[in-house]
Image: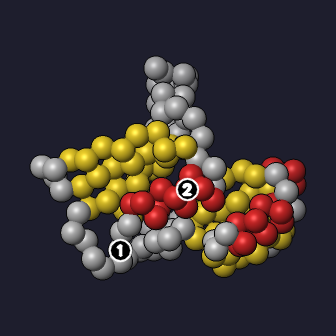
Amino acid sequence: MDNTASGFRMMHTMIRVRDLDTSIRFYTGLLGMTLLRRDDYPGGKFTNAFVGYGPEDTHAVVELTLNWGREEPYDLGTGFGHLALGVRDIHGVCAALEKQGAKIPRPPGPMAHGTTHIAFIEDPDGYRIELIDLDTM
């Protein structure tokens, strides 16, 4: 259903992953998303899993795509930047994620040219996820 003045709404962001079950555990277990659906496409030799914080008809979600038979890592390229999630108590969130094995290449702290506190974590495939402290915006 259209809920914007422009007639458009954000639906999902798709990323390719090498181990779908590991990625689902990361997004659901560490980041608290819900697995919304998982569909196999034998004709195309791929599986899609959609994870998010609410139903697809009202929330933007992440589409995890597994191309069957792929062994080598994907080149993350220079065009993709990151996903961003708002959190409260960024220091506590990062400490808890680190205890669970999350990589945190940019620890929480203020932006270089602002007061908002951010951090970056990496998912199992190396995709960056920015955490934004909602209390410092």
Mark 1 crowdedness (10 Å alpha carbons): few <14, some 14-19, many ≥20: few
Task: Quote the CA–CA distance across marks 1 and 2.
Answer: 18 Å
Q: Secondary structure at mark 2?
A: helix
Which residue has dot 1 on it?
Answer: 74
Q: Is residue 116 left or right of residue 15?
A: right
Which residue has dot 2 on it?
Answer: 27
Q: Is residue 36 left or right of residue 74?
A: right
Which of the two discs, 1 and 2, labels the residue nearer the N terminus?
2
Q: Percent position (x, y) of residue 108?
A: 79, 70
Residue at horizontal 55 percent and vertical 56 percent from the top: 27
Look at the picture and state if 98 lies above or below 5. below
The residue nearer to you, when weighing 99 against 68, is 99
> Is residue 46 visible in the rendered structure shown here?
yes
Residue at horizontal 87 percent and vertical 50 percent from the top: 135
Mark 2 crowdedness (10 Å alpha carbons): few <14, some 14-19, many ≥20: some
Q: Quadrant of residue 120?
A: bottom right
Amino acid at circle 2: Tyr
Amino acid at circle 1: Tyr
> Is residue 9 visible in the rendered structure shown here?
no
Q: Is residue 45 left or right of residue 47?
A: left
Q: Farthest residue in the left direction?
A: 43
Residue at horizontal 66 percent and vertical 79 percent from the top: 105
Q: Percent position (x, y) of residue 39?
A: 30, 43
Q: Percent position (x, y) of residue 14?
A: 41, 53
